[in-house]
Image (spheres, coloured by chain):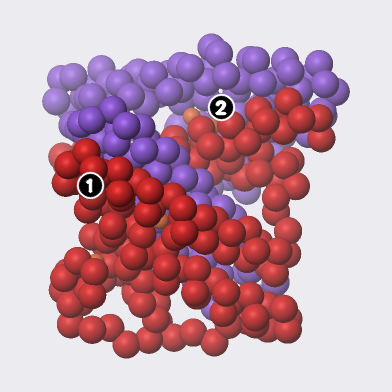
Chain colours: A purple, B red
Amino acid sequence: MRKMTQHNLEDAFAGESQAHMRYLIFAEVAEKEGKHNLARLFKAIAYAEQVHATNHFRELGNINESVKNLDMAIAGENFEVEEMYPVYNNTASFQNEKGAVRSTHYAWETEKVHEKMYKEAKEAAKKGKDIDVEKIFICPVCGYTIEGELPNYCPVCNTKKELFKTF
Amino acid sequence: MRKMTQHNLEDAFAGESQAHMRYLIFAEVAEKEGKHNLARLFKAIAYAEQVHATNHFRELGNINESVKNLDMAIAGENFEVEEMYPVYNNTASFQNEKGAVRSTHYAWETEKVHEKMYKEAKEAAKKGKDIDVEKIFICPVCGYTIEGELPNYCPVCNTKKELFKTF
Ligand SMILES: [Fe+2]
Ligand SMILES: [Fe+2]
Ligand SMILES: [Fe+2]
Ligand SMILES: [Fe+2]
Ligand SMILES: [Fe+2]
Ligand SMILES: [Fe+2]
């Protein structure tokens, strides 16, 4: 693919992904306001943006088999763990922005787990196998990710186990 | 908020939104390969990235009541309709990149509808009301968005009505 078109599709993928995310967030607000139809509109359009993002991503040649998809996932998590979140967390501390210190700390701690889980998944996928995981739990406050047994409180943000989302 | 921290959180929101989207896409691939646990891992971690994106977005002060959220949604759609997709579609044609011509055309046609629907929703929200919409249908191929009655074929990409997703 020509480089300028590639650059544009990468930018469009970023834009669609962020529109999708904003609409999921706005749907929750509408739900809380009792505007259930508006929430439904936001969710429907969030899905439309997912279709657009997927189309651009496919044209970029980024949809491959799972072994290769896991390589991309591991590279992204590793960058966040080793570079992005340490720097953003450090800058937030330096500028005394407490909210940003917290939101980058929560993410940083979580991405460490993600990198590890994806690396294990890649070992299985290389052998052509599915992974062997029990229930996966996600903390709705900090995103912390745990497989198997859940402690009573989130080890990162102290949220009660009852509030975790199960996959 | 200090400007450099704001800049970092905006970048982190973009990164988390794209990670979320990639994992949704990778989950579909894993599902097709019969790797149901891997698909579940991708979906769980996609949700964790949604939590991170939401935290950064909240710290940025971007979560407001629906009237204001709709302003942000309308501004985004309008930019895509009037600036981004016309230019990217034109560049893809100029560089003879047929796949990118198609994926940007699909999105462009859809965003026109989104802008219109969000503007109508804003009129209702300004009066403190929910919107009055029937079923909303999304084309899984091009993202085209229709409320109420569905034609037999997608007006943008010709996909059969039976394949549309209902919200
Ligand atoms: Fe879109
Ligand atoms: Fe992650
Ligand atoms: Fe937590
Ligand atoms: Fe994350
Ligand atoms: Fe849109
Ligand atoms: Fe379509």
Specify the quadrant that holds the N terminus of chain A.
top left
The label nearer to you, 2 versus 1, is 1
The answer to which image quadrant residue B19 occupies is: top left
Q: Disc 1 on helix, strand or loop?
A: helix
Residue A113 in view in this figure:
no
Which of these two is toward me, B39 or B81?
B81
Q: Disc 2 on helix, strand or loop?
A: helix
How far apart are the two marked residues, 2 and 1, measured between alpha carbons? Answer: 42 Å
As drawn, is B33 to the left or to the right of B59?
left
Name the outermost residue toward the front: B94
Residue A69 position in % (x across, y down): 27, 29
Q: Quadrant of ligand 1?
A: bottom left
Residue at numbered disc 1: B93
Which of these two is toward me, B161 or A120?
B161
x 37%, y 54%: residue: B86
Q: Give the amino acid type for the residue marked by disc 2 in the picture.
A: Thr
Residue at numbered disc 2: A110
